[in-house]
Amino acid sequence: MPKKIWKIHDYISQSFYINHPNLKAGQKYGIDLIIFIIGNGILNKNMLITGNYGLGKTTTAQAVSSLLFSLPLEVIRESVIYGHPHLTEEKIVGRLDFSRLNLEEKVIFSLTSQIPSIKIIDEINRIPEGTQNMLLNSVESGDFIYLNDSISGEKYPFVATANYKDEGNNDIMPPLLDRFDISIEVIYPIFITEALGNSIAITNKKRLSNRELSARIKNLLLNKDKLYSKKIEGIKHLKEEFSQKNREIIFNDDEREEIKSRILSLEFSEDANNLLHSFFDYLNSVLQIKGSQRSNHNQDQLFSKITNNYSVRSILNSAIFFSKYFSFISEEDKVSTKSVLTVLPYILSHRTTFRETPSSEDDYSSNSSHFTGVKKLVNDYYNKIFIKHIDLIRDLYLSIKSGDPIKFIEKYEGSDHPLYKRAEKIFNGL
């Protein structure tokens, strides 16, 4: 099944999103945007894509949605939420059926809320913060609620795009930002010809188009006399009809669930598990210092450069899922430290704000891009903390696993390592 993921990657990279391969996974090279947007769809997670206008962010999300959820491009495109300052709840979720107000309160739900595929929000940072607040529940749980009616059922992935900050857009509110498991920054490709206009790309795009089938799917989903569960049941044969001609690149629902199950069944190697958990334990030990004190406390500690707080548990969950996915497409038997190190910057980038410091090699805010700064932070942790203190870290998690912390405390007594200090405090409270 990793082969089919790579087939989808190659199909999109030849037809919808042309850029240079920038990420190695096992023996293969790929484009990070395509690699992780496929993973986001399979894992049923939420993804934020940032970058300048016109780089193919939304187009790529639409193509992946079509391929992973067996729906033609036309109906996917019609379901996209386009961010703007006057976007309303009625456009996002649904509206009252005024023809029935004298009989009952009836809601006509939007195509976006009902379509059984990736929910795509284009230019999310053009939506005012007050309206962004309405997305919180939908992004997290998949539920769409309007007045006293709701669509509750299977959650589907979200992909939101955001252009760089300018006078025409807004900040994404922190609670919404934290609900995105992973983020990608898209940059303009250099030395790329107009490959998207060649005959192969045009032919490939047509494989995902079917106007007649899209109209039937749309009419079924917007039928106000059918229950939502009946609509989803009725759409299955239409999805099957669409996928028949392109089975080598389109997942059906059973295939998608099977590959997700195989990904999540991967176990972590001992060092990968220790790296991931020690990273977040170390991070948590610094985040417990209040923001006003953090800037002047333990200046030599890596995470003292971070000014914001966030949910470590939420980030850890995202890191576990995507590390397993990356190891799966790399054809690893177990999740490796390399996969963890590859994934962490993508998990952390949109959630992290650095304190500006006088220029130095540890000034993560002065790097060429924010993502580069976060990547440097992760690599610095690995080289300066994890590798340097690997025996202490291995012993720490072995003692936790065995339930016998006394030997660990005695062996490293007097250590000033933050993980030892944190463990000592916890173990002494037992």
Image: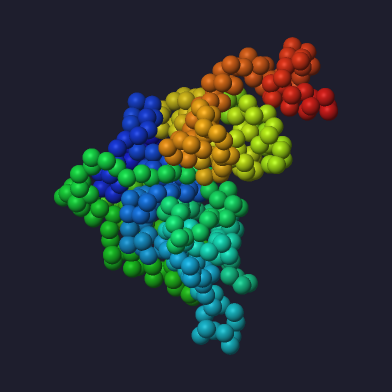
**Residue 259 visible at all:** no
Viewer can see residue 77: yes
Q: How many marks?
A: 0
Residue drawn at (42%, 44%), measured in percent from left and top? 185
In x, y percent, where is residue 104?
Answer: 60, 82
Q: Tell me: 407 left or right of 59.
A: right
282 lies left or right of 67: right
Judge from the rendering whether residue 390 lies leftward or rightward of residue 167; answer left or right: right
Residue name at image x 16 percent, y 50 percent:
199
Q: Nearer the viewer, residue 26 or 281?
A: 281
Rendered image quadrant of residue 353? top right
Q: Against 58, is 394 above or below?
A: above
Vertical placement of 62 versus 6: above or below? below
Q: Position of residue 327 (x, y in %)?
A: 46, 30
**Which residue is pictured at 59% across the width and 58% down the height?**
137
Q: Nearer the viewer, residue 403 or 34?
A: 34
Residue at the spot x=48%, y=48% of the render?
47
Residue extending farthest to the right is 429
**Quadrant that contains the C terminus:** top right
- Give the image quarter of residue 117: bottom left
Image quadrant in which the N terminus is located: top left
